[in-house]
Amino acid sequence: MNDLRLDAALRQLKFRDPLVARRLAEAIAATVAEIGRSPVSVMHVCGSHEQAIAKFGLRATFPKDLNVIMGPGCPVCITDMPEVDEGVALARQGVIVASYGDMLKVRGTALSLNDAQAEGATVEVVYSAAQAVQLARKTDREVVFFSTGFETTAVATAAVLEAGPPDNFSVLSAHKYIPPVMEIVAEMPETRVEGFLAAGHAATITGWGIFEPFVERHRIPVVVAGFEPLDILAGLARLVELVRDREPRVVNMFPRCVTREGNKRAQERLWNVFRPVGGRWRGIAHVPNGNLRLRDEWARFDARRRFTIDLASLWDGVPSALTADCICGDIMSGIASPDDCKLFGKECVPDTPVGACMVSSEGTCKIWHQYGGHPDLAAL
Amino acid sequence: MCLGVPGRVVSVSEWTAVVDFWGVRREVRLDIVDEPVSPGDYVLNHVGFAIRRIPAEDIEQTLALYEELIEQAPPDDLMALDVRGEIHGAGDRNE
């Protein structure tokens, strides 16, 4: 990379430790040059990583031959339409549906939870599963917690069930499990992912050892990284070294938060309550073992077993015509970027999103819309 | 959401702790934290649960990013909003 541009980028980005940032950026550039292919594509699977990469303009420091792409790391985005439909149908059937805020704006086949609320259904925003339980304690009505998120968030849902919620509380689980989807994306011929950057805080729960079988099967390296700009640069520097050296292994670059075993207590709770089953991730694929559903022992708290969910009531709805042009699925698979979408920033903006990627604070499109995806190097 | 939020433990009861987040005190649950916590410890929290006790030597490094987000980021900043959401995820102390 042009030294003056790297200088300008580093100055503009105000790193906490500019010398370390420079050393890491130069190391990444040198390693990618040694690999000698273009592009070298690596993927992260975490909305918070993309937020930090975009917010701090890190792509301005990457060599042009390095492609750092966001994969299916936005839990709101990959919640499948039929799962949203279940939540919407339950709300319209008269139960109180509680969910995380961004989830209300995402459409299923035709309607979102916000639409159901506008029709008179009771839909509540919560910031935690425990708050959904509190709602249930304050009412005689049925409260369904429409629970989304990856394993990190599923642990919290498991914990409130184990703590003994009231009888009028149940869970509509749309929780997803990240390791199986990495297998799917790694096998997609179009993505050509050569390495994964794994999310530090999810690995806090699962431990970095969870990636070892994946690395063994796919011969693709995985580096666990934190969320500081320097953490991400350090993680990428190590990852491209592993790609260069054809050294498929797991490296933990976030030891201040992540151990090999992870948080065992949390894992026990997770697997005591949930079991992995196959299911669709919106726009991506059927992912074997990619969905987390309640085990039979917890059937009485499973909204799918407690209620007859009338999905047919939604089939008359008509999806927005723009939906056909939305490329969220390709973006989450790492095949396309928001800039490739003809709706991005035009018909599709945060106030009137077409696809889920523009709804969630962890969606690639919303992140790029706020911070910009590829910083304009010429402007620096 | 993956960011979580660190906070300082003010007091501990059996299954919960009162945690200070930049002057805001909220209640977090201790059901899944990896080690016992005591007042003065820092914990990393996600959707209302402490998920890890932060070792003393790592606290400063851990807090730096969050301080920047809480104190300097504009109000509509996506990362800052997610961190504030995590603080809301901890319970009101009266609930």
Image: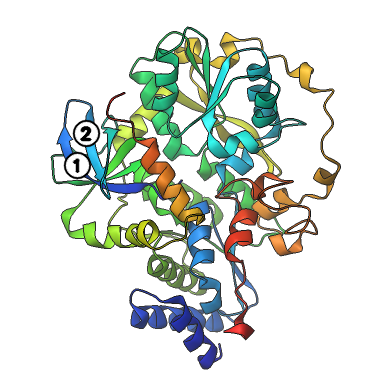
Residue drawn at the location 39% of the way across and 59% of the way down? B69
- How far across and how far down the image is residue B42, in percent? 21, 48
Q: Residues within 10 Å of mark 1 (few under 14, many from 20)?
A: many
The reply, left or right, for residue A141 in relation to residue A279 is: left
The number of discs equals 2
Report how far apart the C-alphas of labels 2 and 1 lie in the structure.
7 Å
Q: Residue at x 17, y 59 (%)?
A: B57
Residue hosting label 2: B17
Q: Is residue B80 left or right of residue A80?
A: left
Helix, strand or loop at mark 2 = strand
A127 relative to B61 in the view: left or right: right
Subunit under mark 1: B
Pinpoint residue A160: horizontal percent, then vertical percent. Answer: 38, 23
Q: Amino acid at mark 1?
A: Val
Residue A235 appearing in the image: yes
Residue A257 placement, left or right of A3: left
Tell me if label 2 and label 1 are in contact, CB under 8 Å: yes
Work out whether A340 lies above or below A89: below
- Residue located beneath label 1 in the image: B9
Q: Horizontal and vertical percent for residue A192?
A: 65, 62
Residue A113: image quadrant is top right
Furthest toward the left, the residue is B39
